[in-house]
């Protein structure tokens, strides 16, 4: 059935027709809500609320805009209301100063404090730009640095930048979605650019990944996986930039500088007392590795963290290790430093 026929059937109560009508939009709507909220779980809730609101108001949709534009208008306003109820999310490096590697890992903070990684299998996004009006690539717009920069924007500036520069909507469409004027949209967009451009690196991860190529990327992530599994801190350190950082959300702990990162790795996760298995992955459009830790009580490996790697050329500049809830129940003795587990 065509979109118009599905719409007609959905308006008269056809739930199957409605599901068929909106399902193709779900992955991109989820990515949109993730950009707005910085959380996969919050994005899931926002998409569910968006589709419920759209279903309830379907009879009032007169086709004055495209179905895509209408759904994004609803989703954006759902996200704006969600942002009003909680503070913005951050990465540990934006939360506080670096940790002393000789002190224990800090206590985990509430989940809603932290940006979450976006699993690439959830993306459902094409490569490149969403349209000729877009400024940022689809995969570039879910990179950790981009999401972190967005969280520093006031909510409506964030919405304007995403709708205009990521999704490629016109100024008039953005103004209609936010019930404002095109002049206000372009004023907000200018201010948003000043903030975001100041916080983004000169080169996106997408540009870096393309420059390195698939074979080199596979070699980098394989080296990281193998070095971690054999507790080879020296091999990992050789892969780092001088200013490399490692962070461990949902704790506020992060360490900066190659020597300090090395000390934190030797203190606990790679001191030889733990048994690891890692698998290469992709998350937030970046290289990643999913780590599993041997649990003697269970007699098997359990998910421990996902390490999202940010590259500077061929070297790793950031390791953000997003801990699984199970990992937070493990405790190490005092003095283990910046540690995992």
Image (cartoon, grey):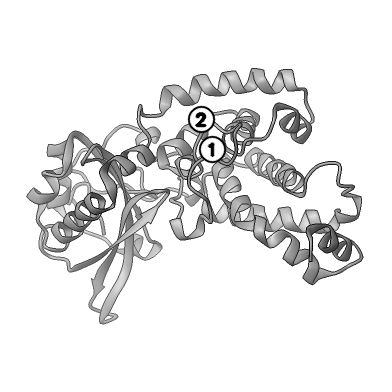
Position in image of residue 31 (x %, y %): 56, 49
Q: Which mark is residue 88?
A: 1
What element does badge 2 sit on? Answer: loop
For disc 1, the neighbor class at 10 Å (few under 14, some 14 to 19, many from 20) is: many
Classify the position of the C terminus by image quarter. Answer: bottom left
What percent of the width, then of the height, locates residue 244?
22, 37
Q: Position of residue 323 (x, y in %)?
A: 35, 56
Rendered image: mark on residue 21: none
Mark 2 packing: few (<14 Cα in 10 Å), some, or many (20+)?
A: some
Front-lying residue, 112 or 158: 158
The residue sitting at the bottom extreme is: 299
Q: CA distance from mark 1 to mark 2?
A: 8 Å
Q: Seen in the image, is 178 located left or right of residue 112?
A: right
Give the x, y percent position of residue 254.
28, 41
Q: Is residue 66 depicted above or below 52 in this figure?
A: above
Q: Is residue 25 visible?
A: yes
Q: Quadrant of residue 241?
A: top left
Residue at x 52% of width, y 44% of height: 38
Q: As drawn, is 24 to the left or to the right of 66? A: left
Q: Which residue is mark 2?
A: 152
Taking 8 as reference, is 326 left or right? Answer: left
Q: Which quarter of the rendered picture does the N terminus lie within?
A: bottom right
Name the residue at 65% across, 52% down: 46
Q: Nearer the viewer, mark 1 or mark 2?
A: 2
């Amino acid at each position: 059935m065509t979109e118009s026929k599905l719409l007609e059937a959905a308006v008269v109560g056809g739930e199957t027709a409605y599901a068929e009508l909106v399902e193709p939009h779900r992955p991109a709507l989820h990515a949109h809500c993730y950009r707005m909220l910085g959380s996969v779980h919050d994005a899931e809730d926002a998409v569910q609320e968006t589709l419920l609101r759209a279903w309830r108001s379907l009879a009032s949709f007169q086709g004055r805009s495209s179905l895509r534009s209408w759904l994004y208008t609803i989703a954006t306003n759902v996200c704006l209301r969600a942002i009003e109820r909680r503070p913005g999310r951050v990465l540990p490096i934006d939360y506080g100063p670096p940790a002393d590697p000789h002190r224990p890992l800090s206590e985990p903070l509430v989940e809603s404090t932290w940006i979450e990684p976006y699993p690439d299998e959830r993306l459902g996004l094409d490569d490149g730009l969403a349209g000729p009006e877009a400024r940022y690539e689809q995969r570039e717009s879910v990179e950790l640095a981009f999401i972190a920069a967005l969280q520093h924007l006031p909510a409506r500036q964030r919405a304007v930048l995403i709708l205009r520069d990521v999704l490629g909507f016109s100024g008039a469409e953005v103004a209609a979605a936010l019930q404002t004027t095109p002049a206000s949209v372009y004023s907000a967009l200018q201010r948003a650019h000043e903030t975001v451009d100041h916080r983004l690196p000169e080169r996106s991860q997408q540009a870096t990944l393309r420059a390195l190529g698939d074979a080199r990327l596979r070699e980098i992530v394989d080296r990281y996986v193998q070095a971690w599994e054999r507790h080879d801190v020296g091999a990992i350190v050789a892969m780092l930039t001088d200013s490399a950082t490692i962070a461990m959300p949902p704790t506020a702990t992060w360490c900066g500088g190659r020597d300090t990162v090395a000390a934190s790795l030797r203190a606990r996760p790679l001191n030889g007392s733990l048994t690891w298995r890692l698998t290469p992955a992709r998350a937030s459009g970046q290289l990643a590795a999913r780590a599993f830790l041997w649990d003697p009580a269970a007699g098997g490996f359990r998910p421990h963290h996902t390490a999202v790697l940010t590259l500077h050329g061929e070297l790793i500049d950031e390791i953000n290790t997003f801990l699984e809830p199970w990992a937070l129940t493990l405790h190490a003795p005092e003095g283990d430093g910046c540690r995992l587990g």
